[in-house]
Amino acid sequence: MNRIILFVLLFAFISSCQLERKDESLAEIISKKKLQDLVNGLRAKGCDCGGTYMPPVAPLKWDYQLERAAIAHSIDMNIHGYFSHVSLDGSSYADRINGTDYPGNPGGENIAAGYGNEDAVFNGWRNSPGHCKNMMNGGHTDIAVGRSGSYWTMVFGRRR
């Protein structure tokens, strides 16, 4: 009897791992370093975000827990064909970040759709005052970006 239970549990575990891998295959390969460098270059110089001057601030570090939240949201928007900071299940960026065991506080989220590469999506966010302010927020310490199809998600956090 114990062997049957063990087999069922093992089969369920393997099946769930395969499902996660299948979903992860919907994530696009992006240049994390390029995106991090673009944002940190902007942060180092300071900039005008829609008429508000944002002074230089410290660079952001890439965080893989945040990356999980960013990729998951991009995949969800791509699969279900919506574009929103609120997921169809009602979860916010903070809920998604907190669900990854990120060792800090959720800071913000930028989303975009229709951009084909890192330069294009960065420029789109740079030219949007709210997104620009998110990138320039000195309270953020960490960053990650995920992409699925033409959907992009950039998330920020602050380490405790």
Image (cartoon, grey):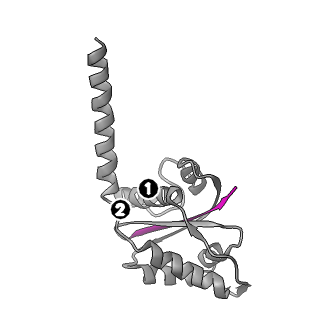
Taking the image as shown, residue 111 lies to the left or right of residue 6, namely right
Residue 32 vs 90, above or below: the answer is: below
Q: To which residue does mark 2 refer?
A: 27
Magenta span: 151-160
Q: Nearer the viewer, residue 125 or 25?
A: 25
Left-right relation of 118 to 12: right
**Quarter of the view holding residue 50:** bottom right
Q: Which of 33 and 157 is in front in this view?
A: 33
Q: In which quarter of the image is the N terminus?
A: top left
Kindly identify which residue carries mark 1: 72
Give the mark, 2 or 1, whose residue is nearer the N terminus. Answer: 2
Q: Is residue 58 magenta?
A: no
Tell me: residue 24, above or below residue 129: above
Q: Main secondary structure of the magenta part?
A: strand
Q: In the drawing, what numbered circle is on residue 93?
A: none
For the residue labelled by badge 1, is the local secondary structure a helix, a strand or a loop?
A: helix
The answer to whether any part of residue 154 appears in the image is no
Image coords of residue 49 (percent x, y): 66, 84
Rounded to the nearest angstrom, the CA distance separating label 2 from label 1 is 8 Å
Please state which amino acid type lies under the numbered disc 1.
Answer: Ala
Query: Residue 13: which quarter of the image?
Result: top left
Other-residue count near label 2 (Cα within 10 Å), few / some / many at <14 / 14–19 / ≥20: some
